Image: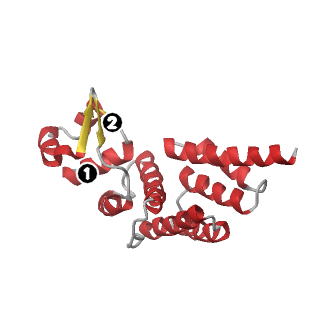
Amino acid sequence: MEGVGGFLFFLALKGEARREEVRARFPRLVPLLRALGEGVEAHGETFRLAKPLRLSWFAPLFQAHYSPLLPEAERGLALERLLEAAHLSAQEGEPLVEGDGLLRAARAFQEGSQSLLRGAYREALHHYGRGLGLLERENLPFPATALALLALAQEGFRPGGKGRETARKALERARTAFAREMAQKALAQTTKEEEKEA
């Protein structure tokens, strides 16, 4: 990972990175910061991106910098962020992402999130299932974000069904705040349903 694109990809994965970690990875930091200008915020000893995560800018970075040669932890984090970007892009009404490989899975999740946000839970389950199938075909483990979004759709479609179990799995695997938040949201929905039935 080198250059401006590599630096943006790194910050998108981390969300926020400490100065020492950034300097170790990007020894020529000053030219990168100059090139990005206001695209990067520095808060004390940490750096983070100034813009919110969206597929419109993250998908091309993902295509350029994601590789099976990345350390396993970074590959997993990249998939988490890709699916998070898909959901956030659906919330913002961005056009569907185009591309091959794992971007097809991101598109399926973006479509699933569009359906979820409309309350079309069966349709969301279909799209999320297609996205999970594409990840499985690549022999990749299911990211926590994928499971958390699936749990929301499952709970919406059939309250008190499989959603709780799926949300618990997502919470166990969660490595990002977004995945934890979505899993907890699904668990909260199952708790509400249980309270109604009691």
Farthest top residue in view: 44
Label 1 secondary element: helix
Report whether 79 appears left or right of 147: left
| First-in-chain label (1 vs 2) | 1
Name the residue located 38 percent from the left edge and 47 percent from the top edge. Answer: 13
Q: Are marks 1 and 2 in contact (CB under 8 Å)?
A: no
When asked about the image quadrant of residue 129, the answer is bottom right
Name the residue located 75 percent from the left edge and 45 percent from the top edge. Answer: 192
Q: Pointer 2: what residue? A: 17
Name the residue located 45 percent from the left edge and 71 percent from the top edge. Answer: 104
- The quadrant in which the C terminus is found is top right
Name the residue located 81 percent from the left edge and 43 percent from the top edge. Answer: 195
* Camera sees residue 143: no
Label 2 secondary element: strand
When asked about the image quadrant of residue 158, the answer is bottom right
Q: Residues within 10 Å of mark 2 (few under 14, many from 20)?
A: some
Q: Pointer 1: what residue? A: 6
Give the CA separation, mark 1 to mark 2. Answer: 14 Å
Report whether 141 appears left or right of 91: right
Question: Residue 136: which disc?
Answer: none
Q: Position of residue 34 (x, y in %)?
A: 12, 43
Q: What sort of colour scheme is used for the picture?
A: secondary structure
Q: Amino acid at mark 2?
A: Ala
Q: Position of residue 80 (x, y in %)?
A: 47, 52
Q: Position of residue 46 (x, y in %)?
A: 30, 31
* Camera sees residue 115: yes
Q: Residues within 10 Å of mark 1 (few under 14, many from 20)?
A: some
20 or 118, nearer to the observer = 118
